[in-house]
Image (cartoon, rainbow, N blue to C red):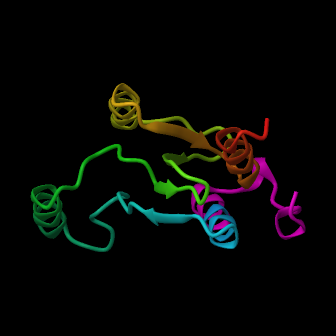
Amino acid sequence: MNEAFANIKKMNLEEEAIQRAIVQYLEIKKHYFYSIPNEAIGAGKNKQQAVARGHKLKLMGRRAGVADLHVYWRFGGDSYLEVKRFNGIQSKSQKAFEAEMKSRGVKYFIVRSVEDVIEIENKLRGNK
C-alpha cells in the first residue's frame, strides 16, 4: 500500500476524515470523481430558512440517500461510493438509492477506508 496512506486507521476516523483521505487517494491515482454534498442543509440557519433551502434544492434535483462520491475510474467504468465510518450504517434512503442503482446495473460500494477503495479499484481493474 502507498506509504502516504499507511497510517490511516480504519476504526478511528469519522466519515469526513475518511472521505478526505479517499479523495486524496483518488486524486493521486488520477481518477475523475466528484462529491455529492447531500448532508444536512440547515446547518447554521433558522428552521424557516432551512425548510426553504431544502425545498429549493429538491426542486433543483437534490435526492435523499445519494452516495457521497461518484468515481469514473481511469481504467474505465464508474461507481458510486458511500463513505461510512467503521461502524456506520446506511439510512433507509441510502439503502433505497443503492437498490435503485444496482437495479440499473450501476456499481455501488460502501467504503470505510482508503484500503476499501484500493480493493474495489483492484477488483474492477481485474487485479484480484
Q: Is residue 5 magenta?
A: yes
* Residue situated in front as seen by the camera: 44 or 6: 6
Q: Residue at x 70, y 72 (%)?
A: 28
Q: Where is residue 115 in the image (x, y as percent from the top left)?
A: 76, 49
- Residue drawn at x 57%, y 40% is 110
- Give the residues drawn in magenta, as a range: 1-21
Counting the numbered discs, the total is 0
Q: In which quarter of the image is residue 52?
A: bottom left
Look at 73% across and 44% down and name the residue there. 122
In the rendered view, would you say 110 is above or below 55?
above
Residue visible at 64% across and 61% down in the picture: 22
Quarter of the picture holding the N terminus: bottom right
Quarter the C terminus occupies: top right
Query: In the figure, is residue 122 to the left or right of 65?
Result: right
Drawn side of residue 19 relative to residue 12, left or right: left
Image coordinates of residue 3 in percent, x first then y, are 90, 67
Q: Which of 59 and 1 is in front in this view?
A: 1
| Magenta residues, dominant SS class | helix
Percent x, y for residue 39? 38, 58
10 versus 123 height, above or below = below
Task: State whether residue 104 is above or below residue 43.
Answer: above
